[in-house]
Amino acid sequence: MIGFVRGIVHVFGLDYVLINVNGIGYRISFYHPEALKVGKEITIYTYQNVREDEISLYGFLSLQEYDLFVKLISVKGLGPKIASGILSAASVDSIVTAIETGDVDFMRRMPGVGKKTASQIILDLKGKLVETEIIDNEKLNDVNDALKQFGYKQAEIKPVLRKLENEDGSTDELIKKALAMLIK
């Protein structure tokens, strides 16, 4: 399996990129044309999809995007094209948050996803996307625990903790800041 491709962007469109790797061109289904510039070197993480009549590569800017893609295609009735479309329409954090909070309406707004598929995605993936992380910072650990006590899900808490990593203040002050961010 091809895990990633690093090379020079030869040409790209709205849903693909052709990367020159030492004189060999790899065509990769890729839905982030805003990240590309012809002649620029880029690394794209790839998923190799093998079917009876086709071998194709799907590309991602980050390992988080790749991991979510793999989990999405494990959902019954969801193929790589729809999964890629979902990832092109929203950020990884917003998709994970929607799944973890059971937001069917958000998922229905994704390209190629109807009510039945949105419900199936949530049913299959809820609780499987966010792992409780061990946080080095004791204050942030306390903030994490406090927010869980208030009923917030880890998917909602994680982005807030990232924003608070470089903040100074007591644990109580950090909890207040976190709550203010979550309420918005």
Image (spheres, rainbow, N blue to C red):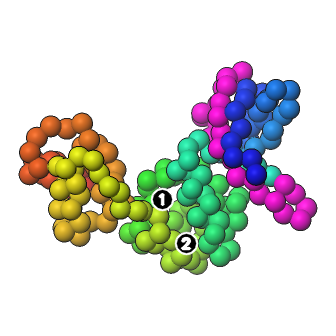
Q: Are marks 2 and 1 in contact (CB under 8 Å)?
A: no
Number of callouts: 2
Q: Quadrant of residue 131?
A: bottom left
- Residue at figure coordinates x 81%, y 38% from the top left: 26
Q: Position of residue 179 (x, y in %)?
A: 18, 55
CA gap between label 2 and label 1 equals 11 Å
* Farthest top residue in view: 39
Does residue 165 lie above or below 106 as drawn?
A: above
Q: Which residue is mark 2?
A: 121
Q: Which mark is residue 167?
A: none
Q: Which mark is residue 95?
A: 1
Q: Give the mark nearest the N terminus, 2 or 1.
A: 1
Does the image show residue 11?
no
Q: Position of residue 126 (x, y in %)?
A: 46, 72
Nearer the observer, 21 or 181? 21
Q: Callout 1: few (<14), some (14-19), or many (20+) C-alpha neighbours within 10 Å?
A: many
- Residue at figure coordinates x 18%, y 67% from the top left: 150
Magenta run includes residue 37: yes
Give, as a single range, the part of the protein colored magenta: 32-55
Amino acid type at mark 1: Ile
Does the image show residue 168?
yes
- Residue at figure coordinates x 70%, y 65% from the top left: 79
Is residue 51 toward the left or the right of residue 173 in the image? right
Q: Position of residue 56 (x, y in %)?
A: 80, 52
Amino acid type at mark 2: Ile
Element assignment for label 1 = helix
- Residue at figure coordinates x 8%, y 51% from the top left: 172
Is residue 142 toward the left or the right of residue 102 in the image? left
Nearer the observer, 124 or 102? 124
